[in-house]
Image (spheres, rainbow, N blue to C red):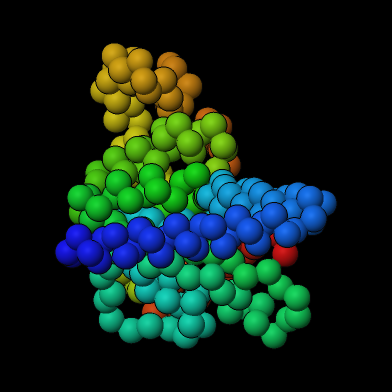
Amino acid sequence: MGKEKIEELKDQTQKWLREAEALVDQIPPAQLYAAIGVVLLTVFLFFITRLFKRTTSDTIVLTGLSGSGKTILFYELKDGLPHEGTVTSMEPNEGTFILPSERAKRKIKPVHVVDVPGHSRLRQKLEEFLPQAAAIVFVVDGVEFLPNCCAASEYLYDILTKATVVRKKIPVLLLWNKVDKVTAHSKEFIKKQLKKEIDKLRPSRTAVSNADISNEITLGTPGEPFSFSQCQNQIVVGEASGLTGETCQLEQFIRANVKR
C-alpha cells in the first residue's frame, strides 16, 4: 500500500472519529449512560451464559474400549433405529435429542450425549467432557469380554479414580452390550471379573498415586477386596443391545440423571 493510500485512510479514519464524537455530543447524557449500560449488561450476560454452558452438568458421556459398540448405541439413541454392522469413531460424536422412548411425549427435555472414542490414544478427549458430565456410561462388549478384560479393567480404573469423577460423584453405568448374542457373558460374570482385575491393579496403582502428590485419589477400602460399593460415586449395572434396539435400561439411567 502506497504512502498516499495510507494518508488517505488516516484522513478518512479521523473524519469518522470526528463525526462519531459529534454524534455522541448530541446524545443527552441520560440516554448515553443508558446505552452504555445496555451494552455492558449484554456483554456480561453473554459471558455468564458461556460460562454456565461450560460448567452445567447436563451431558451423558458414552465411553469404553474401541469395538464395545458404544457408537452404535449412540446412533440408536439419536435416530431411534437399530444399526447394523460396526461403527468406529475416531472423533467424538455429539448430539442433543429426545430419547426414543420419550418422543411421543410432550415437553420432554432433550439430552446431550457424547460418544468418546475408545482407542487408547484418543481417550484423553474424555477429559474435555467430564466437567459437563451428569453421568458416565461405560460400555463393555459382552461377547468379546474375556480377551479385553484386562484392558477394560484398566480403563475403568482410570475413570473411577479421576478427580473430577470422584469429587463430583458422577454416577457410572456399567453397560453390558450385545446381550442379544448367545455367546455373550452374563453381567454377573463380567462384573465379578472386573472386580477381580481392578483388585489386582490396586497395589501398583495406589503406589503410583501415593508417589504423585498431584493425584490423591485411591480406589476402594485399604485392606479389603475391592467392591464397586466402595466407590464414592454411584455405580449401577445394565444391559443393552444396539443391534436390536434394546436400550431401555440405558435410557432409564440417562433420564434419572438428566431431569425433565
Direction from residue 5 to residue 102 in the image, left or right: right
Direction from residue 84 to residue 113 in the image, left or right: right
The quarter of the picture where the N terminus appears is: bottom left
Q: Nearer the viewer, residue 163 or 33?
A: 33
Residue 181's spot in the image, x, y percent?
35, 74
Residue 49's spot in the image, x, y percent?
62, 53
Q: Is residue 245 above or below residue 160?
A: below
Residue 205's spot in the image, x, y percent?
29, 25
Residue 200's spot in the image, x, y percent?
29, 30
The quarter of the picture where the C terminus appears is: bottom right
**Identity of the residue drawn at 79% across and 50% down:** 29
**Identity of the residue drawn at 56% across and 74% down:** 97
Residue 77 visible within the image? yes
**Identity of the residue drawn at 33% across and 20% down:** 209
Q: Farthest residue to the left: give it.
A: 2
Residue 35 visible within the image? no
Q: Is residue 203 above or below residue 135?
A: above
Direction from residue 15 to residue 151 in the image, left or right: left
Instruction: Tally the numbered discs.
Output: 0
**Identity of the residue drawn at 32% across and 65% down:** 8
Direction from residue 99 to residue 189 in the image, left or right: left
Q: Nearer the viewer, residue 87 or 19?
A: 19
